[in-house]
Image: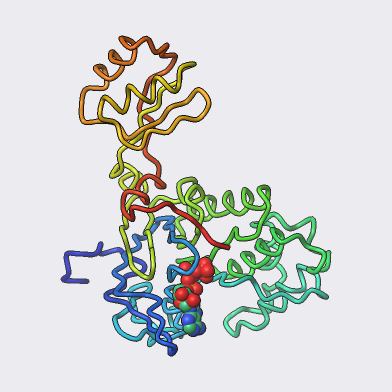
Amino acid sequence: MHDGAKEPMDAVIATRGLTKRYRGGQLAVDGLDLAVPAGSVFGFLGPNGSGKTTTIRMLMGLIAPTSGTARVLDRPMPRAARSVLPQVGALIEGPALYGFLTGRDNLLRYDAADPAADPRTRRARVAGALDRVGLTAAAGKKAKAYSLGMKQRLGLAAALLQPRRLLVLDEPTNGLDPQGMREIRTLVRELASDGTTVFLSSHLLDEIEQVCTHAAVMARGRLLTQGPVADLSAGARGRLVVTTPDPDAAARVLKEQGADEVLAAGDRVTAEPPDRDPAEVNAALVAAGVRVRGFGLERASLEDAFVALTGEGFDVAG
Ligand SMILES: Nc1ncnc2c1ncn2[C@@H]1O[C@H](COP(=O)(O)OP(=O)(O)OP(=O)(O)O)[C@@H](O)[C@H]1O
């Protein structure tokens, strides 16, 4: 049991001041305090280069932190890697597959490399994992003939050969087409509904909103915020949206009413809502002769929260 009140008792991943400075001097991760609750689908969100992969590599004991601590499944990493890692399924930087082997043979080979895996139950285990990721029908095809999405699913199947308490997925949908993305997202939801904690990194805001219960937002190596996704978006104000055939007049009136960041696109005018009763704003529009067809507040998205936190857009390079 912990004595600290700061992180939940059931944190599956907990870091304190976790920091990585690469040899070239690059500060990739800077004083990270992360708390991943058990049973969550936790999105680790940030633009490219914000330090996500570096963090994951420290969590998995692949590289040592410069300072700070990381606990995974309540054991210190990298010290307890030998006892922790068998309980963790990981998919980092694309699965290592043999293209000349079939999907099934890849998994058989993978399973055989695990000294704790009973050879007598190997075929059943592999069949179960293939079924889990929807690759039973394609199991006899060579992996090099698989689409990128199928390769990702085969990598997930390898991570699922043993029961896991935690799955760590680094950009699992990166490079996939929309169909492949949907498949992986559905799979993540299914896995989570079985009680497995899933920690996944992504540079896609809408992906995090679609699949995650919790998220942490990174920018330039630092944690900006973390918590339930609903709370993160609620922290940002929604935008005022006016639908009208008179967008120019509407934009002018909204500015007069004190609205900031007024944007007109087609028949939609959006703005940061001013600090006054929306009914008054609407009345002012009507009084100025603007034909108001729709007037409302749009729910804030995680993107709004990110913009509010950083003062900049969620621009992703590469
Ligand atoms: N081995 C390394 N040596 C030196 N600098 C590195 C190394 N690996 C990453 N970096 C730098 O550290 C910073 C964080 O990189 P990291 O890969 O952790 O970010 P990321 O959020 O995972 O981005 P991406 O999605 O592009 O992988 C970047 O500026 C990167 O250039």
Evaluate whether residue 89 shows in this view. no
In this image, 297 relative to 257: left or right? right
- Indicate the position of residue 269 as horizontal and vertical percent values: 43, 27
In the rendered image, residue 53, in percent from the top left (x then y), is placed at: 48, 72
- State the residue at coordinates (30%, 9%): 287
Name the residue: 33% across, 68% down: 222
Between residue 15 and residue 73, name the one nearer to us.
15
Depth check: give the residue in front, 185 or 119. Answer: 185
Is 89 above or below relative to 183? below
Along the horizontal axis of the image, is 317 left or right of 46?
A: right
How far across and how far down the image is residue 228, in percent?
Answer: 33, 50
Placement of the N terminus among the 4 image quadrants: bottom left
* Residue 215 sits in quarter: bottom left
Identity of the residue drawn at 42% across and 33% down? 263
Residue in the foreground of this view, choosing between 91 and 233: 233
Q: Is residue 183 above or below residue 257?
A: below
Q: Residue 140 at x, y = what percent?
A: 83, 64
